[in-house]
Image (cartoon, rainbow, N blue to C red):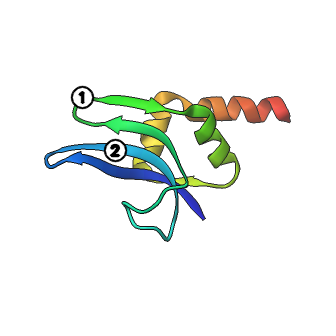
Amino acid sequence: MVKLRLKRCGRKQRAVYRIVAIDVRSRREGRDLRKVGFYDPINNQTYLNVPAIQYFLETGAQSTGTVHDISTKAGVFTELRLNQTNFN
């Protein structure tokens, strides 16, 4: 199973995170399938590759709580709902 979760980068006391699609059995700094975003909590910056996130969510990936909150603020799930209603 694939999850969208945070991967810690940066230096001590200055953490930044990559949002990655990764296998559930992998450790936090393990090898990821694909990088789909970036999150800097200190400067409050976020970059999301929305088509890649939508692809993984449509194929059955689950996001962790924090990644879900970040994606919700960026409006990923509203776009996902709009795409699903257009296909039905």
Residue at 40% across / 37% down in the picture? 38
Mark with earlier residue (2, 1) = 2
User: How far across and down, in percent of the image, does residue 84 sit?
Assistant: 76, 36
Residue 72, compared with residue 13, is above or below; it is above
**Which quadrant of the view contains residue 10?**
top left
**Disc 2 to disc 1, how far (Cα)?**
12 Å
Position of 69 with respect to 82 (left or right) is left
Q: Which amino acid type is marked by label 2?
A: Tyr
User: How far across and down, in percent of the image, does residue 76 sit?
Assistant: 56, 33
**Which quadrant of the view contains residue 29?**
bottom left
User: How far across and down, in percent of the image, does residue 22 sit?
Assistant: 51, 58
* Callout count: 2
Q: Quadrant of the N terminus?
A: bottom right
Residue at 48% across / 49% down in the picture? 20
Q: Residue furthest left?
A: 13
Q: Identify the residue position indicated by label 1 in the image.
A: 43
User: How far across and down, in percent of the image, does residue 77 sit?
Assistant: 59, 35
Q: Residue furthest right?
A: 88
Q: Residue furthest bottom?
A: 25
Name the element at disc 1.
Answer: loop
Q: Residue furthest front?
A: 31
Residue at 31% across / 51% down in the picture? 8
Q: Nearer the viewer, residue 45 or 30?
A: 30
Q: Identify the residue position indicated by label 2 in the image.
A: 17
Name the element at disc 2.
Answer: strand
Q: Nearer the viewer, residue 11 or 85?
A: 11
Q: Quadrant of the C terminus?
A: top right
Q: Residues within 10 Å of mark 1 (few under 14, many from 20)?
A: few
Position of 50 with respect to 8 (left or right) is right
Q: Which amino acid type is marked by label 1?
A: Asn
